[in-house]
Image (cartoon, rainbow, N blue to C red):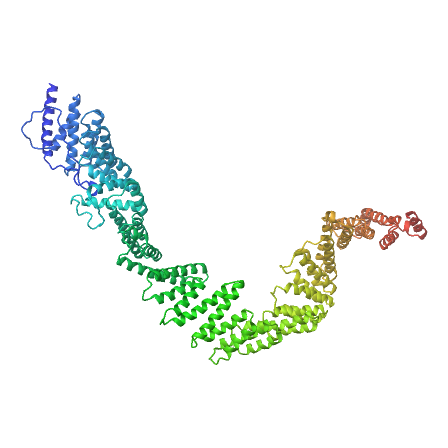
Amino acid sequence: MRVSRLSRLLLAVLTLSVAGVATAARDDASTVGSVAEDNGLKQNGWAIVKTPSILRIEMSDAVPTDIPAAITHYDRILELPNVDPELRAEAMRRTAYLRVQRADGGEFDAREVRRAIAIYNQLLKESPNDPGNDRTLYQLARAYQLVNETDNSIAQLQDLGRRYPHSAMTGDGVFRVAELLYSRERYAEAESNYRTVLNLGSDTPYFQPAEYKYGWAIYQQGHYPQALPVFLGILDRELPQGDIADPAHAFDGVSRRRVEVAQDSLRVASLSFAALGGGPALNDYFAKSGEPRYSTLLYNSVGNRLLEKQRYTDAAGVYTAFVERHPGSERAPDFQAQVIAAYKQGGFNDLVLQAKETYATRYAPGSPYWSSAGSSAPRPEILAQVRTHMDDIAHHYQAFAQSTPISDAAKRRERFLTAANWYQRTLELFPNDPKAADLNLLYADALYDGGQTQLAAQQYANTAYNRPGFAKAPEAAYASVQAYQRLATETQGAGHDAALRESVNSSLKLADTFASHPQWSTTLTRASQDLYALNDHEQAITVANRVLGSGQPLSNELRRQNLAVVADAQFAKKQYPEAEAAYVELLKVMPADAPERSIAVDQLAASVYKQAEKARDAGDLNTAAASFLRVGKVAPQSAIRVNADYDAASAYYELKNWPATEATLEDFRSRYPQHALAADVDKRLASAYEKDSKPHQAADVYTRVARRPSETVDTRREAAWAAATLYDTSKQPAMSSQAYEFYLTTFTPSLDRGMQARRRLADIARDDLHDTARYERYLSEIVVADRNAGSARNDASKLMAAQANLEIGRGQAQTARQLALSQPLEKSLAARKSATDAAVASLSSAAGYGYADVTTAATYELGTVYRDFGKAILDSARPANLKGEPLEQYKLLLEEQANPFEEKAIETYEANLGRMKQGLWNDWIHRSANALVELAPAKYGKHDQRETIYDSLL
């Protein structure tokens, strides 16, 4: 009974669904449509997939469509237990399909769509091998897309393609995958899916849109070499047969439906070639893959694309590539003209120039191009372009060279000569040009500026004398003179003199030919100067006087130049007194601010200096010195004055005229403090002061030498020592102290000098500066310097160190004596003992050096220190509260404390007295004996007892 009800329910629902599906099938189904338009993604291009019944159903009368009711019934079937698997699968397809169809029809409910997705996935899980799963996957993909789960939609369609490659849904599904991937910029995956569609064959309706989008997917990945065959294949198919060059009419023969695809294919192919390098990429591709019939169209298209992008140089490169691949083509001049236009449009003037050079060279009359083209005569329009370009090129290089900085001489010459070469070619190719004379003059100018001086002179002469009626002939004639003059300056050795003679001859020729030439006087003046340069001094004077006496109006400048030739010629003839007089006359007509005045002044000074040298060479030092000093009087600003002043001082020094030497050298120092000779001047000045018994002044100069960084270390060190000793000699203790201290702190002196310097610093500190601390510091430095001298120690350094220790000990002993013992005794006694210990240590160290005088003195001082310490104990302050017998007992206690020091003093004095056994007797031993008489009168007080003791010591 249960089975019967279930069957009736299924029959009713399925009947309802068939009616619904039939209704849906009558709707206009969306197809792939215009898939080439915006990737086919803006329209609903999903096919309506009808799910055929797996049951034989008897069709009942049509019932009103009620999709929600059908969905409800199908869902109830799915809820029933033990439903036949095939029936369940069919119910799942139908309920999911109706949900998707409903959403597709405008009644979108995300929950319902997701319910359909769940059902489809469950169906695939329950019936993985169902032959109708291709439609299930297709519909599932559509459902995912409705809820914007594009990745899942893509995954289902990809699964469709893999599992059902021969399904009717596969072409549509894989193409749709590709489109979705493309829209998400997943170009590599899209490429693979487009390729799958193409592999289905050209019969599939998706082949052409897939081919087109396949190319785009490759292009979007930057795989331009792989994209090109695709788009060129489309062009091969779509473009009409024949040679196609004009982009404006290239697509006239393409069907209206395909013209947009063809145009876009040309555009993308052009962009690909542009991305691969433009022109070189085109040539390389054609060389490897063959050149299509429409290659000219491609060259033009790629170039035009690049121009649109304002990539002017790349566009020019494309046009150049055509010329390089087709050098003999009749279109080659046109493409070269496009190169020029592209560079000009981009404002690349240098490249415009180069392109014009190429045009003028390649297409000039007689060039290989015309031979290969089968015509010896160029076409008129090309000939006109060649002439125009050659003129532009020559003028450009000449102007460019003129604007090049003079400091960049090599580039200027190169550019002028390039201009000259183009002028020459123009004259050769167009000899009858109306502007030939002007071109000839420009040609000569370019040669001259380019350093081809001799050729320039010849061309100037050719322009001046072989171009009758040319208005600029006098100008060209003078330019020829100038060129020959420069040629003379450019040549060396024997050739120089010959060139200079040619310059003179050229100048005289101009003067004879153009008597009224405005440069007549200038040209002859230069000729007189050239004669002077040739050492033809007499003739130079003659030509200079000719100009001066010509009666023509002369500028002050020309007058001075000719007078200068006369003066210089006299100097060159070694007529120095005459030269001096001539320069004086020249200076009279020179303005004070004339630039060349300083030269004339120097020459005047040189004339006097030469006279001084002549006197010195003759042994007349007094005259020489006076003449050297006269240079400063007649030409105080001359460059040679510094040498003259120094030479004058040298002459006085040699004469041993110390006051004159000192005055001259001091004047030199004040005038030229930074001169290179300043160092030598100081050394000679110091020597002069020293020889003149002026130690203070000499020390000042040596101090400057010692502090001059440019001197060698040895020179500075010796000068510093000399300054210190000379300040000592001149009784300048403060300056001497500074000098010795500078010497010690600046240099590394020898041990002996270092010890002497410190000894003098100590003495000055004690005797003159009265600076006890400074005195003791340098005494200590003496001791340390000797101690650290190592193997360099010697008797002198040790004796000096012993004496320093003695003096340090005496100072410390004096400090101890000044420390009276007061109450509380413990505190004052500690201070006195510390000071006494320091004195004992220093005096003991002094005695230990073994030098008799120092040892006996230190021994005596040491005994005195002990004696003073004992006496200080006896004389110490008594406690105020002690009186009577306690006070007496305190005194006895002090005597007991003082007695050992008195005995130590006696022992020390006796040690000094004992040195009599060594044959020593001096004041310190004598003082020690007197001290013993005072300390031990019982032993040393009587005369006969002393004699006995002394005898025992001998």
Task: Determine the residue located farthest toward the bottom in the rendered image.
Answer: 551
User: Quadrant of the rendered structure where residue 536 is?
Assistant: bottom right
**Drawn side of residue 256 relative to residue 805, left or right:** left
Q: Residue furthest right?
A: 944
Quarter of the image where the N terminus is located: top left
Left or right of 391? Residue 206 is left
Which residue: 39% across, 71% down? 473
Observer-nearest residue: 55 or 317?
317
Residue 281 percent coordinates (x, y):
31, 45
Which quadrant holds residue 55?
top left
Q: State the count of labels.
A: 0
Q: Residue 78, how many percent across, how many down?
A: 17, 26
Q: Residue at x 43, y 60 (%)?
A: 413
Residue ranking furthest to the left:
61
In this view, 823 is above or below 680: above
On the picture, is 792 further left or further right than 529? right
Percent of width and height locating residue 630: 64, 74
Residue 397 in view in this figure: yes
Front residue of 165 and 820: 165
* Residue in front for this viewpoint, 59 or 371: 371
Q: In the rendered image, is residue 149 in sight?
A: no
Residue 189 x %, y %:
27, 36
